[in-house]
Amino acid sequence: MNIRLTNHIAYRFLNDESIIWEIMEMVYPEIARITKDHDLKDHITPEMMGTYQMITPKDNKSFYITDSVIKNLDLLKVKRNTEGQYDYTIFSNLKPQKCTFITPDNRLVRMLIPDGESSFQMLFDYIRYVPDKQKKYYGHMNNCMFYVNRMTGEQCSHFTHPDVKEVENLLYRLLCFIYLSDTEEIILKPGEKMGTKKSGKLINEIKQPLIIVTSKWNITSIRTEGFKVSGHFRLQPFGKGRNQVRVQWIDPFDKEGYVRGAKKDTLEI
């Protein structure tokens, strides 16, 4: 089975400039009125320009997240604080960048860490495509923007919105996976393919390189008898003063000692 990005919302988001203006009009309905009577350049606000820079494909790196990676994310144990929030300050050392994380289920998240005075912000645009069950080739796009201060952990006022919460659990683990653990990047140039007939063949049909992230985690397999705590990943402090964080595999607790090594985990598309 071929996995074709032409059937994914990412194809339009990364290839079609018109979708950028669809999103702009969703966020700023007044844009449609302004463009009818005036030159948009004379009326666009700094806030509008910031949103445009956030969603335009320029200077973007795209990551395709396979199903097998998403399954591994379920093994990563992360905790919320007493206020029910994840700790985003562990990403304080990330450099300014723009990335798009593409999942197989027709969703994507654009992340922007701006350069300059506002570089402490992590800006996110969550987009999903919902097919219309009544019409085979139709559907609608949902779009939600939010941000968090990666130096203080302060979140935007609508961080508790259901659309944000829908993606945050996956997003936070994904950021940990990509930036805090040992990963391997496979770069697929435009038009290139990878995979097999059995696992599925991914075809890069966007206009820019597509980064396929695979895991180098060597997971230990276990027997269920006698185990009270299964193997899992967690965020582990390390370094001088233990002020850095990385993803660490924790072996299962086995009172009887029935733990055996497993082959290296293989990720299929």
Image: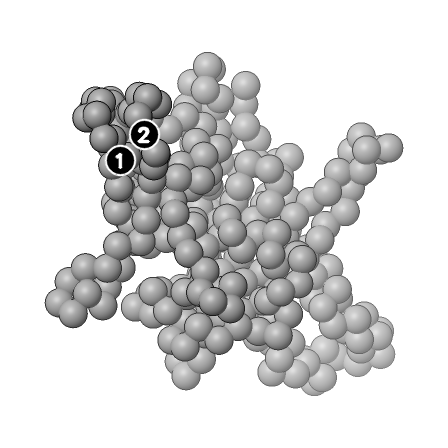
User: Which mark is on residue 49?
Assistant: none
Please give left or right for residue 224 compared with residue 158 in the image.
Answer: left
User: Which mark is on residue 253?
Assistant: 1
Say above or below: 14 vs 206.
below
Residue lying farthest to the top in this orientation: 198
Q: In terms of secondary structure, where does tag 1 sit?
A: strand
Q: Residue 180 in the image: x percent, y percent?
A: 30, 53
Q: Residue 126 in the image: x percent, y percent?
A: 60, 56
Q: Quadrant of the C terminus?
A: top left
Q: Residue 40 in the image: x percent, y percent?
A: 72, 77
Residue at horizontal 49 percent and vertical 22 percent from the top: 200
Amino acid at pointer 2: Phe
Amino acid at pointer 1: Phe
Please give left or right for residue 85 compared with residue 116 in the image.
Answer: right
Give neighbour class at mark 2: few <14, some 14-19, many 20+ (Cα, 10 Å): some
Q: In terms of secondary structure, where does tag 2 sit?
A: strand
Give neighbour class at mark 1: few <14, some 14-19, many 20+ (Cα, 10 Å): some
Q: Quadrant of the N terminus?
A: top right
Residue position for label 2? 227
Say above or below: 231 vs 29.
above
